[in-house]
Image (spheres, rainbow, N blue to C red):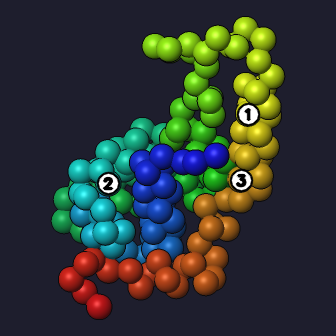
């Protein structure tokens, strides 16, 4: 199963926020620069994460982004399901529906594989993803113009 770049970016943003552990709030721009991705893409992902209750923002001087308790303890598979939406691994219908759609076992096999994929990722929380050596690497990330 391949994730969209959007979901990959959202997960990396969550991981980056997880290692700050509330010590310092980051801005969307700082996350975009550290991950070396466009600000607009990062802003969309952050807005979605806020809508899901994973990230919260504080306005004003000293404001920024932080993970919520839900975000810190979120299961990776659960986050991916929410970010990717409830779409199937293979598209049997649509503009050009597959002629086998009514009696094909491939769709069922993909659905089972997708469930197994998510179940394996549900074994991990966001905190698990930022354990060493990942956490220290994330903390060292800075924008494209910094060493």
Expressed as whole percent of the image width and height from the top left, the position of residue 118 reads: 71, 45
In the displayed image of the protein, which residue is found farthest to the bottom? 147
Q: Which mark is residue 121?
A: 3
The spot of residue 83 in percent (x, y) is 51, 41
Q: Which tag, 3 or 2, sits closer to the chain's start?
A: 2
In this image, 133 relative to 43: left or right?
right
Q: Secondary structure at mark 1?
A: helix
* Numbered label attached to residue 110: 1
Residue 144 location, x and y as percent?
Answer: 25, 78
Q: Is residue 10 visible?
A: no
How far apart marks 1 and 2 lie (CA) works out to 30 Å
Count of picture labels: 3
For residue 103, side relative to residue 64 (left or right): right
Q: Residues within 10 Å of mark 2 (few under 14, many from 20)?
A: many
Q: Which residue is denoted by mark 2 in the rendering?
A: 42
The answer to which of marks 1 and 2 sits earlier in the sequence is 2
**Position above or below: 57 against 19:** above
- Identify the residue at horizontal 36%, vertical 50% (top origin): 46
SS type, badge 3: helix
Q: Badge 3, how many Cα within 10 Å: few under 14, some, many 20+? A: some
Quadrant of the rendering where the C terminus is positioned = bottom left
Give the label on residue 147, or none. Answer: none
Q: Is residue 94 above or below residue 36?
A: above
Q: Specify whether residue 142 is in view.
A: yes
- Local SS, label 2: helix
Labels 3 and 1: the sequence-earlier one: 1
Indicate which label's residue lies in the foreground, 1 or 2: 1
Residue located 67% across and 68% down the image: 128
Q: Is there a contact, CB below 8 Å, between mark 3 and mark 2?
A: no
Badge 1 crowding class, 10 Å Cα cut-off, few under 14, some 14 to 19, many 20 or more, is: some
């Amino acid at each position: 199963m391949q994730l969209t770049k959007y979901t990959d970016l959202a997960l990396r943003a969550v991981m980056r926020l997880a290692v700050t552990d509330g010590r310092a709030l980051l801005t969307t721009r700082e996350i975009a620069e550290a991950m070396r991705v466009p600000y607009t893409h990062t802003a969309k992902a952050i807005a979605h994460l806020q809508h899901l209750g994973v990230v919260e923002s504080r306005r004003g001087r000293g404001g920024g982004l932080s993970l919520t308790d839900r975000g810190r303890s979120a299961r990776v598979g659960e986050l991916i399901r929410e970010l990717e939406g409830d779409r199937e691994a293979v598209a049997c219908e649509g503009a050009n529906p597959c002629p086998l759609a009514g009696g094909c076992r491939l769709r069922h096999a993909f659905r089972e594989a997708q469930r197994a994929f998510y179940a394996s990722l549900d074994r991990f929380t966001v905190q698990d993803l930022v354990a060493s050596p990942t956490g220290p690497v994330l903390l060292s990330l800075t924008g494209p113009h910094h060493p």
